[in-house]
Image (tube, rainbow, N blue to C red):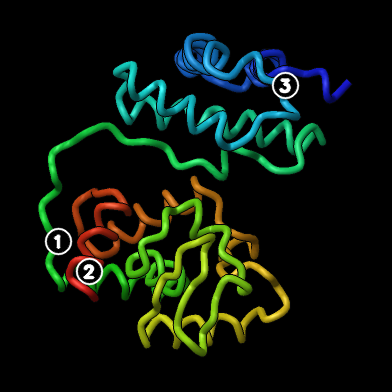
Amino acid sequence: MQEEYTVDAWAEIWFARNAGKWRASTEGGYRNLIYRHIVLGVGKIKLAELKPHHISAFYKALAESGLGSRSIWCVHLLLRHCLDDACKDGFLDVNPADLCEVPTSERRPAMRVRSGQIRRYLDAAECGGVLPIIYIGLTVGLRQCELFTLLWADFNLQHRYILRGKRLLTLDEQAVSLLTAEHERHPDIPHAFLNPKTGEPFRLHEFYYLHRKLLEQARMPKRGFRDLQTQCMEGKL
């Protein structure tokens, strides 16, 4: 029965189902990630009871054990794919891995980007039809997983703020202008930001690759969205 699957049982089914689709080296890498990390970390939790906080704690434990941020990201991608198929098969309504932010290990501070680079980044976002989510993300300070789940009900555009839980986050005039135009495009959909390619709210991996694409288009060095957000908020775009 659906509710009797544990994460490790489902991971084994998923791996067996897909193993023949991968190259030998890829299959070996996936096997390692599943049995060395996923099964040991969250394997005994029932699939139907797996929540974002379980996965967040799992990633945090991996980071504290010394596993590098790149390796943790690989674990995250594999777990997300595995749970995506569980959603398709009807075992989950929502993929809890989509609501988790992958922790990063301590690293040297990135070199500050120039204002011209940020302008090119925003121009690329505008050309791609994603300027509202990018601008709000850079200027308000929400975590990515919070950004994806924003509803129009969270905004008060007349008084220029977002009410998120107990936090009152202010919006500047450009943010209000962008949000007003965005709301007019899909007034009947409760989510504020939609992926223009899918018409659905962004998922973490989609936003990750969008950010990388915008960096490339802006001819900027690789850096995390959070790093860029911090600098933008300090400099007040």
Residue linked to disc 2:
118
Task: Give the residue displayed 68% in from the left and 70% down from the top.
Answer: 190
The quarter in which the N terminus is drawn is: top right
Mark 2 lies on a secondary structure that is helix
What residue is pinned by disc 1? 113
Q: CA distance from mark 2 to mark 3?
A: 44 Å
Does residue 142 appear left or right of residue 35 in this picture?
Answer: left
Which mark sits nearer the N-terminus, 2 or 3? 3
Where residue 82 appears, x then y in whole percent?
63, 28
Question: Which quadrant would residue 102 be assigned to in this image?
Answer: top left
Q: Is residue 49 above or below residue 139?
A: above
Foreground disc of the pair 3, 1: 3
Q: Is 183 above or below relative to 113?
A: below
Residue 106 picture location, percent across and down: 22, 33
Task: Return the disc, 2 or 1, that comes first in the chain's sequence.
Answer: 1
Q: Amino acid at mark 2?
A: Ile
First reached walking from the N terminus: tag 3 or tag 1: 3
Are the residues tagged 2 and 1 within 8 Å (C-beta)? yes
Tell me the residue that label 3 is attached to. Answer: 46
Residue 216 lies in quadrant: bottom left
Query: Which residue is rendered at x = 37% and y = 36% of the image?
Result: 103
